[in-house]
Structures are given as C-alpha cells and as structure tokens.
Amino acid sequence: MQNRVFSAKDLGKYFKVRRKKLGYTQKQISELSGLSASFISDVENGKPTIELDKAIKLANVLGINLLMAER
C-alpha cells in the first residue's frame, strides 16, 4: 500500500495505523526498537520536530519502506 505524506501528522497517523495492524503497543515497539515510548508517541501524534534518523529506524521496525520520488 502506498500513502502520500504531506505533514508530520500524516506520517504519525500512518505509523500508528501500521503499529496497531501489527498488534503492538507503543511499549512493545519501544522495546523492539530501542527507541523511547515517548518518542514513538511524539511521532504518532505528529510532532514536527522529531529526529529523522530515529523515525527511519521506527519505520524499519514497523516494516515500512520510506521512498522518495519526484512529482
């Protein structure tokens, strides 16, 4: 499935849907990824100042491919 992301809120919503689809809590993802539960919450709530490298790590843990394409 492909989704276009136009904002931090879009990204967070997609990550949250994916996490729930996999049946994980934020705490479980935190333990799997080594990222704090508060960071995962920040991402899912669309905080615009998250650290990109950590968001990429979270995407990988959730099995999300982040792709770049020209329009």
Image (cartoon, grey):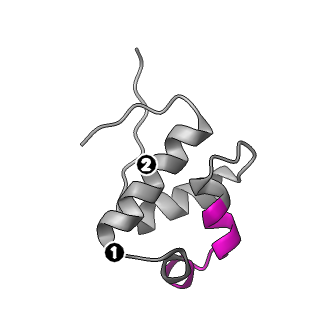
Q: Quadrant of residue 20?
A: bottom left
Q: Which callout, 2 or 1, points at the residue further toward the start of the chain?
A: 2
Q: Which mark is residue 23?
A: 1
Q: What residue type is labelled 1?
A: Gly
Nearest to the observer: residue 42 or residue 56: 42
Q: What residue type is labelled 2?
A: Tyr
| Residue underneath mark 2 | 14
Asked if residue 7 is among those painted magenta in the image, a careful observer would answer no
In the image: residue 47, left or right of residue 7? right
Residue 69 in picture, x, y percent from top left: 40, 26
Secondary element type, mark 1: loop
Q: Label 1: few (<14), some or many (≥20) within 10 Å?
A: few
Residue drawn at x 57%, y 78% is: 30
Q: In this view, does 71 lie above or below 34?
A: above
**What is the quadrant of the C terminus in the image?**
top left
Nearest to the observer: residue 29 or residue 55: 29
In the image: residue 17, left or right of residue 21? right
**What is the quadrant of the N terminus in the image?**
top left
Q: In the image, which residues are magenta?
A: 30-41
